[in-house]
Image (cartoon, rainbow, N blue to C red):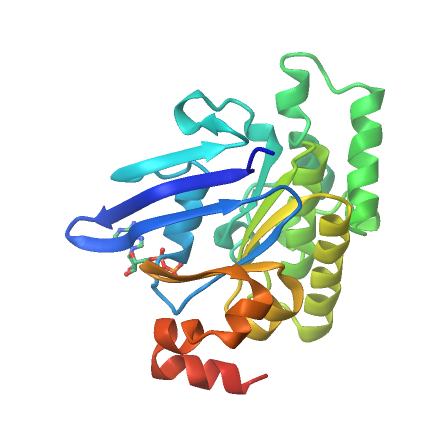
Amino acid sequence: MTSVIDITDVSLSYGDTPAVSDVSLTVETGEFLGLIGPNGSGKTTLLHIMLGLLEPDTGSVELFGTPIDAFDEGHRIGYVSQQSTNKGSSMPVTVREIVEMGRFSHVGSRRLGADDHAIVDDALETVNIDTLQHRRVNALSGGQRQRAYIARALASEADLLALDEPTVGVDAESRDQFYGLLDDLNNNGITIVLIEHDIGVVTDRASRIACINRELFHHGDTASFVESNALADAYGASGRIVHHHH
Ligand code: ADP
């Protein structure tokens, strides 16, 4: 079976500052990978490398079995960046218009047809924002906005969903509902990579965990992570503080 993501010996520095050093890992079809590590440990950088958004200095990246240079199925990847959820968009576009963008790579230069609109309707319903579809995205709460971007990924028929700290600034109830939605999507076969600072959320939800602090400290199933010293090793003293919340 081909992996969804396969990175080998990947390193990237910003100038003289190494951000990711010699990381190799795979994400398999249907997996829910939690990517954790302290602030500034290279999580976003690594995710960008994994999705082909940043080119590593050394190492190789394959998406869905294809070397990144030859990969041309971007619609299979749904990416909800920190920026899209936290700051939102200043563009005066409605929720429905955002979700319709998910169809663009499928329709090319033709207009959206009835089939496309049905897929958009489904996506809006799946994430439970169909009643908000005519609202402007920048008038939504952070939690609602995340749902809009996830609906866009669903409309593009993405089979990999990558999210970077999607619940920052979202209240506890919306957060639980949001993670329930992610579980449902994962149970329906969508592969998930999630950066999340709340380690309790990750150990509750993810099937595998990658714990980094520039280098990879642990990559394996959640149970083996909980039993390992990777958390303390990667986080130092701060790891214990974070862990005490749970
Ligand atoms: P995390 O997501 O774990 O907080 P990042 O991948 O954002 O970590 O950052 C890793 C390190 O690289 C940090 O020291 C950060 O300051 C630095 N960094 C991130 N992006 C840039 C950039 N565009 N230019 C220079 N340094 C950066």
- What residue is shown at x 65% (from left), y 70% (from top)? 204
Residue 100 drawn above or below residue 160: above
Position in image of residue 235 (x %, y %):
37, 75
Asked where in the image residue 77 lies, by quadrant, the reply is top right
Residue 55 seen in the current view? no
Position in image of residue 240 (x %, y %):
44, 84
* Residue that sits furthest to the top in the current view: 110
Give the left or right position of residue 102, taking residue 117 as reference: left
Viewer-side residue, 160 vs 106:
160
The quadrant of the picture showing ligand 1 is bottom left
Residue 60 seen in the current view? yes
Give the left or right position of residue 17, taking residue 105 as reference: left
Q: How many marks?
A: 0
Image quadrant in which the C terminus is located: bottom right
Viewer-side residue, 201 vs 22:
22
Residue 152 drawn above or below residue 143: above
- What residue is shown at x 81% (from left), y 52% (from top)? 128
- What residue is shown at x 63% (from left), y 68% (from top)? 170
Position in image of residue 29 (x %, y %):
63, 41
Position in image of residue 209 (x %, y %):
52, 61
